Structure formats: C-alpha cells, structure tokens
Image (cartoon, rainbow, N blue to C red):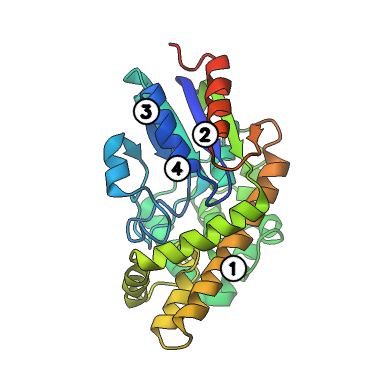
Amino acid sequence: MSLEVDRAVLIAGPTASGKSALALRLAERLGAEIVNADSMQLYREMRVLTARPSAAEEALFSHHLYGVQGADEPLSAGRWAVRAAEIMAAIAGRGRVPIVVGGTGLYFRALVEGLAPIPAIPPELRQAVRDEVAAAGEGAHALLAEADPALAAMIRPADRQRIARGIEVARATGRRLSEWQQVPPVPLIAGRFAKIVLMPDRDWLRARCDARFARMVEEGALAEAAAMAARDLDPALPAMKVLGLRPLIRHLAGETTLEAAVAAGQAETRAYAKRQETWMRTQMIAWKSFFTQDSESVKAKIFSFIDDLGLTRS
C-alpha cells in the first residue's frame, strides 16, 4: 500500500547544477523539510567531498538522510526509497511539504515508480554475503552466475555491490532477483508532486564543476581523503567512488601532484555530470525541465510552476 504524502517537490539534476540552493529557497517559501536523494551525500565521513549542505544550512530547515551512513555501509536504491517514503509521510503528517533533492536517478525511480516486493534480507546474511564477495574478489561474479545466471549476464564483474545483492536475495528468499524484478512494482508514495529536473547550459555546468572541486580542496577535502585512506576500505565500496576521492588519495600517497589530483577530480566531476544529464534526459521525460542556469529568473519560473500545481496550498 502506498504512503500518502499529499504534496511534495522532487528536484533532480546533475551535480553542481544548483539543486541544494534551490531546495533551500523552496523550503523557505513552502515551510518545507528537505530529504536527500544523492547516494554519496548519505556518507557521514565526507561532507566536503560530497558537497553536502553545510552545518549552517542544515540548521535553517530540517534535513533528512544526510550523513546517515558509514562509508562501509552501502545503501541500495530500494532501501533508500523505503526510508525516504516513510520520512516523507512523517513530514506530511506534520503538515509540512517534503522536498526531495539529489542527483541519483535510480533513487527517484525507486521512490516514484515503486519496487518489486522483495522481502527484507536478514542483516547477518547480508553481512555474510558481502564478506564472501569481498574475499572472492574477481571470483564473486561466478558465485552470482551460480545463484542467478540471468542477473549475472547483466552485471559487470567489478560491480560487487550488485553482485552481493543478487546473491543475498537468492539465498534469503529462494527466488532469484531477476525473477523478483519481473513482479509488478508496488508504489511507495501517492500524492501531488512537482517533478523538476535542472538542465543548465553545459559550458556553465562544466565551469561550476571545476570551481566547486577546487573550492572543496580549499575547504577540507584533503583531510577527508586522508581519513578515508587511513581506513583502508574495500575499493569496490560505493563510498570509495566519491568524485575526486581516489585522485586525492593518490596525491597523499605521493603518487601525483596536488595540481594533477585536482585536475583529475575536476575531470571525474564533469564526466559524471554528463552521464547524469544523459540519463535524466532519457529517463525523466515526464518531469518538468528547466534549462536556464542557476539564476533568479529560473527560480521565479520554478516557483510559478509549483504555484500552478497548487502545492503551496493545503
């Protein structure tokens, strides 16, 4: 059964497109609370490197699902969506508007379109499978091929998170994940939603990506990278793929200059933004796109769009 949230604003867009700033403006206008839909901003260890809202910004309005996971605790799109839907329902129950903001398209898909009704996986089994996959290394893909051949055919051997997910579902439920995925999804939320995608000019966005990464280095990204390197985590973990983290770790190890590390981090960010933009253009066709870069004029258009949907009224 879907959770009723009545009104909500969903803001997607590539990295550095101004989503968080827009969410703060809307929160002030609507009396809202903000819910994170960025898979990397879940991690508590990397506020700077993941461009999480600052502590001062988080203090202005209630923020949810920011910095709630340890770097060694992957969170699937499905489990995020369940938590986000519950939080949205609680916000609505307080008579406030949830604003869901982020750049992880699969999170939005899971939230809006629903999920196959896969039973919860016991935590001890999940951890055991992840330990087994880590120990198997490149051989983990063969374990998945044995448990779920159809799923294995669609997953890269290096994608340990999805490999572990396929194995744990097969073992816990006695049914392959590829079979579960054929079951009609169960919607998680219902209500009036403003679905917004920010699509700024590409040259403007590239410049923003470069400037933001350089600023991150000035504001503490190196210290966060050093702390992550000291933990010696599995490099296949999603947290270890935070944009720019690996180049900075290589610099700290003396393998490259800081200038080269910054350039590599900027290049990673630009490439990721391009992939996000491509995904959102093809997968979020029904969402309302705003093509102008971050400016007062585009904010006025977005506010008007939300007003026209009646989301400013109970």
Which residue type does callout 3 highlight? Answer: Glu
Q: CA distance from mark 3 to mark 4?
A: 13 Å
Q: Secondary structure at mark 4?
A: helix
What residue is rendered at 63% in x and 62% in y? 271
User: Which residue was labeled with disc 3?
Assistant: 28
* Mark 3 / mark 4, whichever is N-terminal: 4
Residue 114 occupies quadrant: top right
Left or right, 171 with respect to 280, comes to left
Between 192 and 303, the residue placed more toward the observer is: 303
Q: Amino acid at mark 4?
A: Ser
Q: Earlier in the sequence, mark 1 or mark 3?
A: 3
Which quadrant of the rendered structure holds the C terminus? top left
Local crowd size for mark 1, using a 10 Å CA cut-off: few (<14), some (14–19), many (≥20): some
Q: Would you say the residues marked 3 and 2 are in contact, meaning their CB atoms lie under 8 Å apart?
A: no
Image coords of residue 140 (percent x, y): 56, 70
What is the CA distance from the residue labelled 1 to the residue labelled 3?
A: 34 Å
Is the residue marked by circle 4 packed among few (<14), some (14-19), or many (20+) residues within 10 Å?
Answer: many
Q: Which residue is mark 2?
A: 296
Distance in Å between CA atoms under marks 1 and 4: 22 Å
Q: Residue at x 45, y 55 (%)?
A: 40
In three-dimensional space, the C-alpha distance between marks 4 and 2, rounded to whole angstroms, equals: 15 Å
The Cα–Cα distance between marks 2 and 1, rounded to whole angstroms, is: 28 Å
Residue 3 at what x, y percent from top left?
A: 46, 23
Residue 267, labelled with which disc? 1
The first of marks 1 and 4 along the sequence is 4
Q: 291 above or below 121?
A: above
**Secondary-structure class at tag 3:** helix
Q: Amino acid at mark 2?
A: Glu
Instruction: Give the residue number, with chain letter if any, for mark 4.
Output: 20
Amino acid at dot 1: Ala
Q: Comparing marks 2 and 1, which lies closer to the viewer?
A: 2
